[in-house]
Image (tube, rainbow, N blue to C red):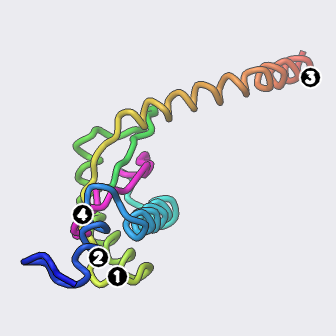
Amino acid sequence: MKRRPGRHRGQDSAAALLGDEPGGRVVRLEHLLFEEVDRLFRLEVVDRRVQCVAIVGVQLSPDLRNAKVRYAVRTGPSTPPQRDIDQGLERIRPFLRARVAEAISLKRVPQLHFHRDRLAEASLRAEQVLQQERTAPLRARLEQEQEDRSG
């Protein structure tokens, strides 16, 4: 069997794994990272500046050293300014990375980089509007019952 110069055994499979198309392992790692970071945000992060943040995706770099964590901001009356959210994310980054290292057995835990996803925010807003529309008849009926009782 003749090998191409400059190639070592197993390098073809590594190139396929780390190439443009994410391989099965990379997809599984992205999914695990997403689940763990999302769980940490929902259950363990207590910084008020990032309570409005929803994790929407994780994308690993080809060398698996960096992870782009995409997030959306749920808007509301108590939503902090973006600058405060960015400071909060910077502050909790080491905590998240340490907890990911405890939860997922990896040779090297990727660095986490946060990127705001405005498209996902639009989806969250649309979902909120739909939820309000679904509950509007119920709210109207409850208000009517309260008026009937008091009047």
The circle on residue 109 is: 2
User: Which residue is rendered at x = 37% and y = 56% of the image?
Assistant: 58
Which of these two is toward me, 102 or 109?
Answer: 109
Among the two numbered marks 4 and 2 on one chain, the one whose residue lies closer to the N terminus: 4
- Disc 1 versus disc 3: nearer the observer: 1
Identify which amino acid the numbered label 2 is placed on.
Val
For disc 1, the marked residue is: 106
For disc 3, the marked residue is: 149
Q: Are marks 1 and 4 in contact (CB under 8 Å)?
A: no
- Residue at disc 3, secondary structure: helix
Which of these two is toward me, 80 or 6?
Answer: 6
Q: Are marks 1 and 2 in contact (CB under 8 Å)?
A: yes
Which residue appears farthest toward the top when viewing the image? Answer: 151
> Label 1: how many residues lie within 10 Å, few (<14), some (14-19) or many (20+)?
few
> Label 2: how many residues lie within 10 Å, few (<14), some (14-19) or many (20+)?
some
Magenta residues, start to end: 50-68
